[in-house]
Amino acid sequence: MHKLTNLRLANRNFRRQGILEKKLAQLYKKLLALQTLFKRATVTTVVVGAMAITPLPSAAQKFAAFEINPFGLVRLELIHMPDFTDLDGDGDLDIMTGGDHGAFIYYENTGTDSIPEFTAPVSNPFGLTNTETIFNAPDFADLDDDGDLDIITGSYYGEFIYVENTGTITDPAFAVLSSNPFGLDTIEGMGFPTFADIDGDGDYDIMAGGAGGYEGIFLFLKNIGTASLPHFDAPQTNPFGLSSTLYLNIPAFADLDNDGDLDIMTTEYYGPFIYFINTGTAAAPSYAPPQIDPFELVSTGNFSFITFGDLDGDGDDDLLTADYYGFYAGNFLYFKNTTPITALDEDLDGYFGSTDCDDTNPEIHPLAIEIPNNGIDEDCDGMDLITQTQDIADKKITIYPNPVSETVFVTTDLSIALLISIFDLTGQLMHTQSETNEIDVSTFPAGLYFIKVSSPTHQMNVVEKLFVVR
């Protein structure tokens, strides 16, 4: 496989490329046949043993047949590995792809979050430079917890390359490339990293698809540091019940069964879509045996890079792929998620998936009326509204201005010490202080926060919404 890839990248010896392609395709068909026989044998064993074991069905998702290069996207004559991200902070999904010889290629969405329209591709924007590897496979996350999106990319020889965003969430600017930061080491073979909080502890972990020998393995790199100072542990191979694919593994996370945890879709060399449903939880994942081409997806059978995102603003995850080999090489293929909203919204309150924190109760959803002090989070903001306790009910606490752009003040006629804390929507502590009642929020990104006023000496716990504007 490496020999064929090198020949393609060098753009030479086309006869040899064709021979190698045919041999690989024949080998894949033989392995697929063996896989089918093995599955039949497994089913037979289950029936003979009269055990109540049945394959896990795919959740009620459905994807339409793919469209080629929609929304103004154009074909590229090179490797490209797409990733959705809102890189300019305008509320819609842009695309950054990893390109040939390590280039970063950016497609800005100048449409909306429901009607996308992408500009012509721009190579190495925002100060980015080529990684000088055969390819790069970028993924985005706020690794230093400063409110903007940084990059870690994989490479042909297994090196992890980090690019810190020294700009802002709306005006990115990227620093020089650094190799294997945060305790990372080069892995054997090609690496395709993707970020997610896999163990539910509030920081980003890495799941990397690896390619070594004849196997495409999953490598889990747990973040044993913090959300602002990450440090990644040694990789664990095929954890949580995951199993290897053929030659390559190019994973992407999405909650495809809408149960609040992360499932995995991946592809393999000359292979189908492979779906691993998470039957565990958001904090303790456990993956069932793989399902092939689920949700009525039809794969091209080539070397496909995949990413999920809600491109049409209807609340479900659509799929975008880019093929390296075959008839569709260089094109973007868009698979629209056509799942009816009623299949996703169990309580029919207009909210579903991860947006609705309780999809069994129509009285609980974003923008619902919050009932204070009942221990229930009606408006899905991450906490119950807590009002002042009885011993200070006749006192006054004022938080102003709100909305705020620079400094927020907390005043009270109580002669007690106050502890003031500010949290973002995920519950991440952004700031805490007790020495003064003036809080500088000038470096906070615009958005909704929660300010909590408490006292170490009195029974008091007041939480208010705080709007930061720019």
Image (cartoon, helix red, strand yellow):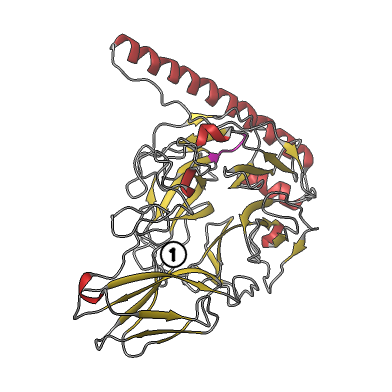
Residue numbers of the magenta segment: 266-270
Give whichever of 306, 463 is nearer the camera: 463
Residue 387 location, quadrant: bottom left
Judging depth in this view, the residue of 130 and 150 nearest the camera is 150
**Does the magenta-highlighted stretch encompass residue 267?**
yes
Kind of residue sitting beneath label 1: Leu
Q: Nearer the viewer, residue 439 or 116?
A: 439
349 up-or-down from 388: above or below? above
Mark 1: give few (<14), some (14-19) or many (20+) Cα within 10 Å. some
Main secondary structure of the magenta stretch: loop
| Residue visible at 28% across and 55% down in the picture | 375
Left or right relative to 392: residue 244: right
For this rendering, which residue is in front, 428 or 222? 428
Helix, strand or loop at disc 1? Answer: loop
For the point 39% across and 16% down, the residue is 43
x and y percentages locating residue 407 in the rendered image = 49, 85
Q: Quadrant of residue 340?
A: top right
Q: Which residue is mark 1?
A: 184
